[in-house]
Amino acid sequence: MNKILVPTDFSPQAANALGVALSIARISGAELHIYHVIESPDYPEITDIMAYQSLGNTNVLEKIEERLAQITDCEECADIRISYSIDFDSPYEKISNKASEENYDLIVIGSHGRKGIDRLLIGSTTEKVIQHAPCLVLTIKDATSYFSPSNIVFGSNFYGEIASGFSCLRKFADLYEATIHLLKINTRSHFETSRYSRQLMEKFAEEQQLSNYTINIFNDDSEEEGILHFARDTEADMICVPTHGKTGLSHLISGSIAESVSEQAFRPVLTYRIQPATIKYGVIAPFS
């Protein structure tokens, strides 16, 4: 964990994300970069307009510079290598491109938790970052006085493509000596026998050289609800879900478990992108 990117819109959720990012930087020794993107579409979101109005009637760019300088000069940041920058254009594109071009290991971003029609019509910068970012994305909603996840729930089907990128989660868990709870959700439409699921998960744990883990099979109405319910029942500190990063029509049709969980969960959610599985004969199944 060498470089952490923290997008900010100066909201309470962004402040919560910064607090967590500082904690991670402190334990990992990573440098931290705070990034504000001024969106300039024809019709900006009402939340963006309100955020800029709260800065006052003076030059907006100057006020943003002052706010970022105040954040980076605070006492809490004194022992962290920290910097900031401002950019213009589409926030999620700029954030994703910056993470890719400058080789960031982790994005820590706040979530406003939009639901229902707002989520469909307006969308969410956090959701789009999860879809497009090349690195780990940690989504934060609530403030936390001390971020130290000792129990991490990893929800997956444990098929072959899931392994790509899992090493990033393992390294993150190692920072905190956390237990990874491998979780397979059984639903009516996607059912596997417990014996078969357990074999997949045991093989996965062996291939990933996990030593501190548990195997769990949980039944629920949907994958999203199962992950959220299991995390709540076990009082997990963090949830991790891989995502295929679907966009456009495929996203509207099938959605994304990772993005749905990150929007609904009240605990931190870590996501990483994987390549979509090759589907033959309309069947998704494990493969090497």
Image (cartoon, rainbow, N blue to C red):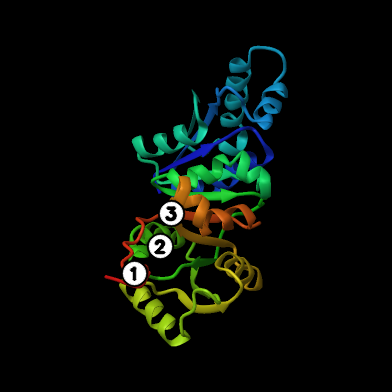
Give the CA separation, mark 3 to mark 2: 12 Å
Give the CA separation, mark 1 to mark 3: 16 Å
Q: Name which residue lies at 67% across and 46% down.
A: 117
Q: Is residue 271 above or below residue 112?
A: below
> Circle 3 is placed at which residue position?
272
Secondary structure found at label 1: loop
Among numbered discs 1 and 3, the one appearing first in the sequence? 1
> What amino acid is labelled 3 in the image?
Tyr
Which of 180/160 is in front? 160
Residue 91: percent from left, percent from top: 51, 32
> What amino acid is labelled 2 in the image?
Arg
Q: Is residue 67 above or below residue 225?
A: above
> What amino acid is labelled 1 in the image?
Gln
Residue 74: percent from left, percent from top: 61, 32
Secondary structure found at label 2: helix
Judge whether residue 115 can be spotted in this image.
Answer: no
Residue closest to the far front: 281
Residue 37: percent from left, percent from top: 53, 28
> Circle 2 is placed at which residue position?
170
Q: Are marks 2 and 1 in contact (CB under 8 Å)?
A: yes
Q: Which numbered marker is on residue 208? A: 1
Q: Name which residue lies at 30% across and 71% down.
A: 287
Residue closest to the far left: 288
**Picture quadrant where residue 234 is located:** bottom right
Q: Quadrant of the C terminus?
A: bottom left
Among numbered discs 2 and 1, the one appearing first in the sequence? 2
Give the CA separation, mark 2 to mark 1: 8 Å
